[in-house]
């Protein structure tokens, strides 16, 4: 038995990072009877088999879990919201803050596209005064990127928010080697096109960060 962390799950296959390597695994069949489903971020025990599929044998205790995005054992939730295109939605920000607090996850509010709007200081003041860390980011000069990098070391973090707000663009600014797919906001629908199809953890700045399917 070998311990590791699930860093990607897609099509019924789970990719588990251990001290030795990353193994492609299937989940043990009895998980279904137990109504358990492995999540990206889970710490697990796996069996590595030469002439058969590697298998997740045990899901270790979780400190928290989310359904959308489907992740476990998060330390931080970066709540990304654009000021324009799409316009900021404070209801979604507040809802995600409430979920994070309830799950014992540290929320961090990230406001993007500050180069396209002059209202960012007003929103920052609101969330700062409520006791939440708020970071301002601009796609034009990548301001705010270094502040985000400093928060990632030694932690498991997720970047989430409404679609089209620039989550993948922001992660590419944090680490350009990621080269995540990005998409323009749909002018007809007024919201972003989905570019991320599954949750996945990436090693960045001494920690793990997740790119996740957008919220609808």
Image (cartoon, grey):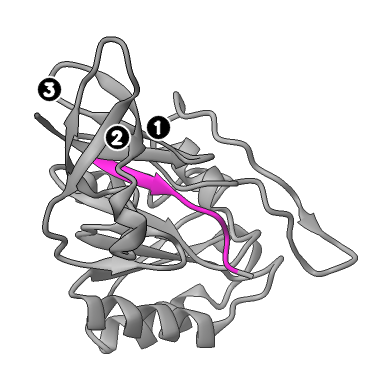
Mark before the other along the chain sequence, 1 or 2: 1
Identity of the residue drawn at 23% across and 76% down:
103
Give percent across and percent down for residue 129: 27, 88
Q: Residue furthest right?
A: 188
Which portion, as a residue range, is magenta? 208-215
**Relative horizontal placement of residue 34, taking residue 169 as reference (left or right):** left
Mark before the other along the chain sequence, 3 or 2: 3
Specify the label residue 204 is tagged with. 2
Q: CA distance from mark 3 to mark 2?
A: 17 Å
The residue that mark 3 highlights is 19
Identity of the residue drawn at 29% across and 52% down:
30
Mark 2: secondary structure? strand
Up/down of 66 relative to 140, above or below? below
Label 1: few (<14), some or many (≥20) within 10 Å? Answer: some
Identity of the residue drawn at 23% across and 46% down:
152
The residue that mark 1 highlights is 175
- Nearest to the observer: residue 155 or residue 3: 3
Which quadrant of the rendered structure holds the N terminus?
top left
Q: CA distance from mark 1 to mark 2?
A: 7 Å
Q: CA distance from mark 3 to mark 1?
A: 23 Å
- Nearest to the observer: residue 158 or residue 133: 158
Choose mark 3 or mark 1, whichever is in front: 3
């Amino acid at each position: 038995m070998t311990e590791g962390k699930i860093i990607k799950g897609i099509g019924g296959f789970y990719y588990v990072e251990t001290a030795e390597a990353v193994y492609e695994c299937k989940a043990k069949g009895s998980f279904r009877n137990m109504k358990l489903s492995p999540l990206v971020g889970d710490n697990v025990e796996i069996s590595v088999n030469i002439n058969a599929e590697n298998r997740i044998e045990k899901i270790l205790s979780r400190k928290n879990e989310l359904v959308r995005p489907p992740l476990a054992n998060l330390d931080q939730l970066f709540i990304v919201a654009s000021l324009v295109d799409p316009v900021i939605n404070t209801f979604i920000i507040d809802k995600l803050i409430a979920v994070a607090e309830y799950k014992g996850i540290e929320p961090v509010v990230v406001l993007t596209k500050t180069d396209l709007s002059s209202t960012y200081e007003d929103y920052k003041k609101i969330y700062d005064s409520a006791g939440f860390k708020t970071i301002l980011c601009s796609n034009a000069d990548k301001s705010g990127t270094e502040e985000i990098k400093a928060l990632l070391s030694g932690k498991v973090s997720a970047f989430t928010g409404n679609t089209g707000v620039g989550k993948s663009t922001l992660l590419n600014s944090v680490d350009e080697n990621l080269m995540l797919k990005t998409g323009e906001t749909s002018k007809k629908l007024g919201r972003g096109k989905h570019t991320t199809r599954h949750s996945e953890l990436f090693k960045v700045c001494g920690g793990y960060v997740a790119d996740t399917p957008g919220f609808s």
